[in-house]
Amino acid sequence: MDTPQIGRGRTGRACRWSAGLACAALLVTGCAAQTSAGAGAPSGTGGGGVTVTAPAPATPQRSDPPAPPSSPPVARHGRPAHPTIAASAGAFAASLPARWSDGVVLTVARVRHGSETGRGPGDFTGQPFTAVTFQLRNGSDRTLDLSAVVVSASYGTPARVAAPVYDDTAQDFAGSLPPGASATATYLYAFPPSALASATATVDLDGVHAVAQLRGGLR
């Protein structure tokens, strides 16, 4: 008696055909699954070798708060200030310094414009700033404590606070300034280019001198 041979005759061909269809179905299902998995990928190579690039993060924008209606001197060492030395306003021009009645003079020595390059927390890469270098000359008969100087800035109508910017060129007033000596410092602020004409710098020396302002002439 002959032993039956699997795969021979009509029945065998039908089995091979059914097996082939089953393999093809599995291949199609696998490709579809890979394509679906690739479509949801935010970046890199997705299904079918298609590269999907995630959108670049948006550059953050500043939102400057309203400036206070007045600029009183700040309290120092927990005590309120009571200035007794009057000040007259100046401008962002070397020919128009701010002056105090005891002979102290504040002049804008240099103005420089640039763009922020930092990429850390709090940086606004690519946004413009203005660097103002001040020169303070002590024409009084007493030594000034420059570590107490506070400089702030605003712009626009109604006025808004100009955010300070910090980079390697920023330098605060510091140390002591004896009679007859001069000192310089550079402060950076994020004035919008369209608001330079309305920029104002407010300088609070030490609580003994009245607050002085520099307004106009910035360009």
Image (cartoon, rainbow, N blue to C red):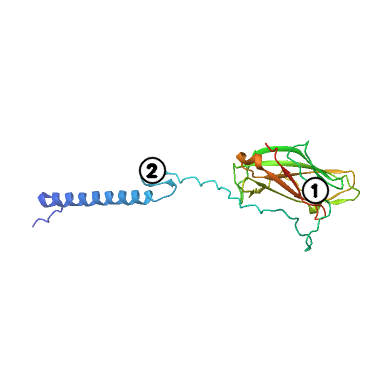
Image check: 62 left or right of 101? Answer: left
Q: Residues within 10 Å of mark 2 (few under 14, many from 20)?
A: few
Residue 60 rendering spot, x and y as whole percentages? 55, 48
Helix, strand or loop at label 2? It is helix
- Snapshot quadrant of residue 72: bottom right
Precedes in sequence: disc 2 or disc 1: 2
- Closest to the observer: 57 or 176? 176
Residue to which mark 2 is pinned: 49
Quarter of the figure with the C terminus: top right
Residue occupying image coordinates x 70% and y 40%: 216
**Disc number for residue 136:** none
Residue occupying image coordinates x 34% and y 51%: 36
**Amino acid bearing label 1:** Ala
- Closest to the observer: 70 or 40? 70
**Farthest-out residue, left:** 1
Instruction: Please state which of the two labelled residues, at mark 2 or mark 1, is closer to the viewer.
Output: 1
Helix, strand or loop at label 1? It is strand
- Snapshot quadrant of residue 77: bottom right
Residue to which mark 1 is pinned: 87
- Closest to the observer: 77 or 198? 198
State the separation of the CA atoms marked 2 and 1: 71 Å
Residue 134 rendering spot, x and y as whole percentages? 77, 42
Residue 130 rendering spot, x and y as whole percentages? 67, 41
Image check: 132 left or right of 60? Answer: right
